[in-house]
Every structure is written in structure tokens, then in C-alpha cells.
Image (cartoon, rainbow, N blue to C red):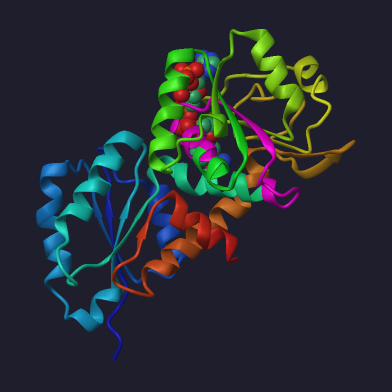
Amino acid sequence: MEPQRILIQLDPDRHASVFDAVVAIDSNVQHLLQYSDVEPESVRGLVHGAMFTRGPADLKNTAIFVGGSQVSAGEALFKAVRQSFFGPVRCSVMFDGNGANTTAVAAVLSAAKHLPLSGCRSVVLGGTGPVGGRVAKLMARQGSHVCLVSRDLAKAQSACEQILKQIGSTDQAALQACASSDQNALRVALGEAQVVFACGAAGVQLLNRDQLSACPKLKVVIDLNAVPPEGIEGISVMDKAVQRGERFDYGAVGVGGLKMKIHRAAIGKLFTCNDAVLDAEEIFAIGQSL
Ligand SMILES: NC(=O)c1ccc[n+]([C@@H]2O[C@H](COP(=O)([O-])OP(=O)(O)OC[C@H]3O[C@@H](n4cnc5c(N)ncnc54)[C@H](OP(=O)(O)O)[C@@H]3O)[C@@H](O)[C@H]2O)c1
């Protein structure tokens, strides 16, 4: 008889995420073991408990999910999980701190429905955050020329350098930094862009109606902010491929359906083998296959 599917939820927050738990159950996980307030030093023991209880053939029925609301703390747990494995005795693991991976993947795949990403010009507003950084990385990986925007040029430059390093590229032109205060540079980048993503903090407007209407080449606009006011003025949170002229617009809820589908599919993938490591790019591949 096939052993039951157990998901071990590791969360740096005081209370393990209810959202992550509900999605796990909706993804046909049979048992959910939740650990909150987890620190990197505790991870090894927890992971070994998962690794050494079932035989190698059954380990694909035990998987680990690292989530919660603190993305950097979650990343540290995810790293500690990977470092706890050795040899073939391991189990699959997924990272989706604060939904950053699944949200970024859903945003990029939404854009991909309307134009080839390779060679397109894109602007990522709020590009230094967990979601924006992942959007910029996935877009650069797909061959887009990305302009990553922050309020602070040095912060944008540092994010670009980090992403170029992660994707193993030395092509500086693939990823350019821009300060939102440099109105001229921002206008030029937006004027050339086919895609713009608003990935700023909740409740922060990054682009107004006039700035948006001065972007003649835009084919896709994606605003991931769900809290009023809109991240891009005039884009409704409910927009889902709403056509306005030559443009297709998406709001946070409009992207959310695909995000949830990708999240559930990724949890499903964890239980197909015992060695999957699902971070942004692997989750992107799962999203592409849906
Ligand atoms: N649809 C979904 O399911 C879903 C899931 C997760 C997240 N989200 C949404 O996606 C967006 C991005 O999430 P995140 O976690 O990456 O966001 P975040 O870390 O809170 O913020 C992203 C960036 O916004 C900029 N920012 C912060 N405060 C600002 C202000 N007052 N004015 C202008 N810029 C400001 C910062 O960049 P600089 O300091 O570099 O300027 C920051 O790095 C959020 O709106 C979030 O609510 C949606």
C-alpha cells in the first residue's frame, strides 16, 4: 500500500501560515505537519526526522514546504533544508515565502500569453522586493531586456548585479537599474517597454494615469498590488487580460487564479519524486507545463 502523503510546513513566523496550510490541503496532501517559529539551527533535526523514517522508495510521499510571511527568513530555512540532505536519502522541497515565487511566476506567465518574452522590453517597478526581484530574474532568463526600478538607484543596481550573478550572465544590457526619482530615465524606459509589472509594496501607487498613457508600446500591464490605491492608476485589482486599446491589463486578483493553480501544481509535483527542489525557476517550468 502506498504510504500517505505528508507535507512538513516550515515557517519562520510565530504562527504557521493558514494560507499555506489551506493550499496544501487543497493540493491533496493527506497529513500536514506544521512547525512555526522555525530557525535555521532547528532545520537539520526536523529534516532528518523526515528523511530517516521511510524507506528510499517511499520518500516521495514525504515533502517539505517552506513558506510564511518573512521572505528572507524563509530563504534561510530553505537553504538549511537543502544543506541537511546528503546522498540519495532526501525528500522534495518547495519555497514560496509570502507567495513570492508563485506570484512572480504567475505574473510572468500572464505576460507570456500576449507576446514573446524573448527580446521584449520590460519594466519592473518595485523590482527590489521579493516579488519584483523574481519577476525581473524570470524575465531576464526568458531573454527580456529588463529595467528594474527602485526609489534608490544603488539598491536597484545591487539587485541587478545579484540577479545577473544568479542567472550566470555578464550581459549588463539585459538588466538595467533605474531610480524612480529620475523621471527622464523612467519615461524613456516606459516609452520603450512592451510590458510593465508593478511589484511595489501593498497600497503604494507607483505609476499614475498620465505616466501610463505616455507608454505607446505597452502590450501588457500587470499590477500585483491588491490594496488601494492601485499600484498603477486605472488598473483594477480584478482585471484579467482586460483589453484597453492595444494593451492587456491584469490586476492582483486577475493574476491570483493562475498563481493558486501553479501553487497547487507545484505541491503535487513534490510528491512525484523525492529530490525535487522547487524555487522560482522550477516553479516557472511547472507553470509553463499547465
Ligand atoms: N496576488 C498575490 O497573490 C500576491 C502575493 C504576494 C504579493 N503580492 C503583492 O505583490 C506586491 C509585491 O510584493 P513584495 O512582497 O515583493 O512587496 P514589498 O517587499 O512589500 O515591496 C516591494 C518594493 O516596493 C518598494 N516600496 C516600499 N514602500 C514603498 C513606498 N512607500 N513607495 C514606493 N515604493 C515602495 C520597495 O522598493 P524600493 O525601496 O527599492 O523602492 C520594496 O522593495 C505587493 O503589493 C504585494 O501585496 C500579491
Image height of 250 relative to 186, above or below:
below
**Residue 160 x, y percent position in the rendering:** 46, 28
- What is the quadrant of residue 244 in the picture? top right
Q: Is residue 254 magenta?
A: no
**Residue 24 x, y percent position in the rendering:** 41, 60
Is 156 placed left or right of 149 in the picture? Answer: left
Q: Is residue 131 magenta?
A: yes
**Residue 255 shows in the view:** yes
> Which is more toward the observer, 146 or 27?
146
> Which is more toward the observer, 129 or 122?
122
Q: For the C terminus, which image quadrant?
A: bottom right
Question: Which residue does the image show at 58% across and 19% down from the upper left?
Answer: 204
Question: Which residue does the image show at 16% across and 43% down from the upper left?
Answer: 40
**Residue 32 x, y percent position in the rendering:** 30, 63
Is 250 placed left or right of 97 in the picture? Answer: right
Question: Which residue does the image show at 68% across and 42% down from the upper left?
Answer: 119
Question: Which residue does the image show at 69% across and 25% down from the upper left?
Answer: 232
- Stretch in magenta: 111-136
**Residue 233 shows in the view:** no
Is 116 placed left or right of 1 in the picture? Answer: right
